[in-house]
Image (spheres, rainbow, N blue to C red):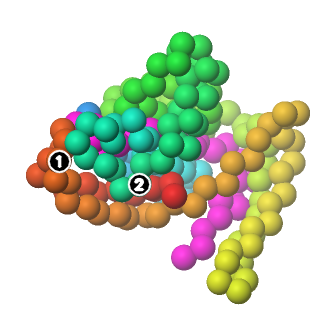
Amino acid sequence: MIWLASALAAEPVALVELFTSEGCSSCPPADAALDALVEASEGKNVYALSFHVDYWDRLGWKDPWSDARWTGRQREYSRIFRQNGRVYTPQAVVNGREAFVGSKEDVLRKKVTDALERPAAASVTGTATRVDGAVRIEVNVVGAPIGGELFVAVAEDRREVDILKGENAGKKGVHRHVVR
């Protein structure tokens, strides 16, 4: 299924980026909180992306969706938010403005509610079409700040795996919004 957030034109939006890992025992509650928030926000411009970081992989379980690029993205937020290079999971970021512990449901709901009360900084419209086995994406951005970046992500909506080692050994990892 091809999905593109083309409904973002000039309307308030909340984009939640969750930095998570199957190797982290604190992450499943954050994953569940994000899923519940997205479900409860149907009809609103609430979008979620789960970035599986790779720094937990050395502790006994290789998260099949972890990627050094997502660790790099999280480290860049650490720099922006002046966290002295510290990264942790689960970490949530709403609209690229502020980082907080992703398993704190009340904080997550408040940050999303606040984001939906502010006008969007830019409007984004676009289309996605399949062309010869690939996806062609055309995007129009209006009102973007100078030096702003457009990040396009492909996310799978539901992934499951039996976790055999690490802090979550014996559990089934169920994930939505998994950025690939």
| Upstream in sequence: badge 2 or badge 1 | 2
- Residue 102 visible? The answer is no
> Pointer 1: residues within 10 angstroms few (<14), some, or many (20+)?
some
Q: Nearer the viewer, residue 135 or 3?
A: 135
In magenta segment, residue 26: no
Q: Name the main secondary structure of what is drawn in magenta.
A: loop
- Residue 145 visible? The answer is yes
Q: Amino acid at mark 2?
A: Trp
140 up-or-down from 85: above or below: below
141 up-or-down from 161: above or below: above
Q: Residue at x 34, y 29 (%)?
A: 104
Q: Residue at x 77, y 53 (%)?
A: 124
> Pointer 2: residues within 10 angstroms few (<14), some, or many (20+)?
some
In magenta segment, residue 23: yes
Q: Nearer the viewer, residue 42 or 156?
A: 156
Q: Nearer the viewer, residue 8 or 91?
A: 91
Q: Amino acid at mark 1?
A: Lys
Identify the magenta region. Answer: 1-25
Query: Viewed as shown, does residue 9 lie left or right of 40?
Result: right
Q: Residue at x 75, y 68 (%)?
A: 137
| Quadrant holding the N terminus | bottom right
Q: CA distance from mark 2 to mark 1?
A: 15 Å
The quadrant in which residue 107 appears is: top left
Q: Residue at x 43, y 41 (%)?
A: 53
- Residue on which disc 2 sits: 65
- Residue on which disc 1 sits: 165
18 up-or-down from 173: above or below: above
Give percent across and percent down for residue 147. Answer: 84, 33
Query: Viewed as shown, does residue 117 lie left or right of 64?
Result: right
Give percent across and percent down for residue 114. Answer: 56, 30
